[in-house]
Image: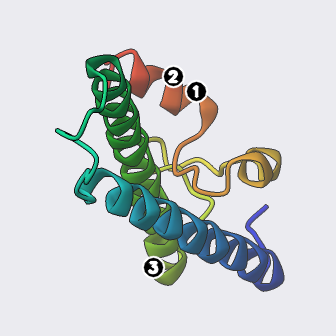
Amino acid sequence: MPLSKSEIEHFKKRLEEMRSQITRVIAGAKKEVTAPDESKGYSQHSADEGTDDFVKQVNLEVTSKEFGLLRQIDRALEKISEGTYGICDISGEEIPIKRLEAVPYATMTVKAQERFEKGLL
């Protein structure tokens, strides 16, 4: 059964909120990673430098994952504007509402997602 207009509006609002939240997280991480470290070279212990470098690396990895999630959210919002939200990109089957409630940016059914992740598609 296709999604109603009110259900689509509900998911659109959730996706836009998620997008806004992730954008803020990315901006914060980017600011932290690109900020100059003013204490370097001034009696800071080399272990502290290693910790700082590790924290920056973790922030970069988190940012990378957030960018991936942002792309998925953007694709789901694109599907809403195309009128294909709730339809699997791979199989053309309807994505169950329970899946969309759990993962509003889902663009594939669980079965198609598993095949995609295993490299079978």
Q: Could you say which is closer to the camera, residue 18 or residue 111?
A: 18
Q: Amino acid at mark 1?
A: Lys
Q: Quadrant of the image for the C terminus?
A: top left
Where is mark 1, residue-wise?
111
Calculate the distance from the C-alpha at mark 3 to the C-alpha at mark 1: 23 Å
Q: Earlier in the sequence, mark 3 or mark 2?
A: 3
Calculate the distance from the C-alpha at mark 3 to the C-alpha at mark 2: 25 Å
Q: Are marks 3 and 1 in contact (CB under 8 Å)?
A: no
Q: Quadrant of the image for the N terminus?
A: bottom right
Q: Quadrant of residue 32?
A: bottom left
Where is mark 3, residue-wise?
82
Local SS, label 1: helix
Tell me if mark 2 has few (under 14), some (14-19) or many (20+) residues whose alpha carbon lies within 10 angstroms of its own: few
Local SS, label 2: helix
Local SS, label 3: helix
Give me the residue at 30% from left, 32% from top: 44
Where 49 falls versus 27 (above or below)? Answer: above
State left or right for residue 21 relative to residue 42. Answer: right
Q: Are marks 3 and 2 in contact (CB under 8 Å)?
A: no
Give me the residue at 49% from left, 83% from top: 81
Give me the residue at 67% from left, 57% from top: 104
Picture coordinates of residue 27, whole percent (x, y): 41, 67
State left or right for residue 46 relative to residue 97. Answer: left
Where is mark 2, residue-wise?
114
Q: Are marks 1 and 2 in contact (CB under 8 Å)?
A: yes
Circle number at residue 39: none
Where 18 falls versus 17 (above or below)? Answer: above
Give me the residue at 51% from left, 22% from top: 114
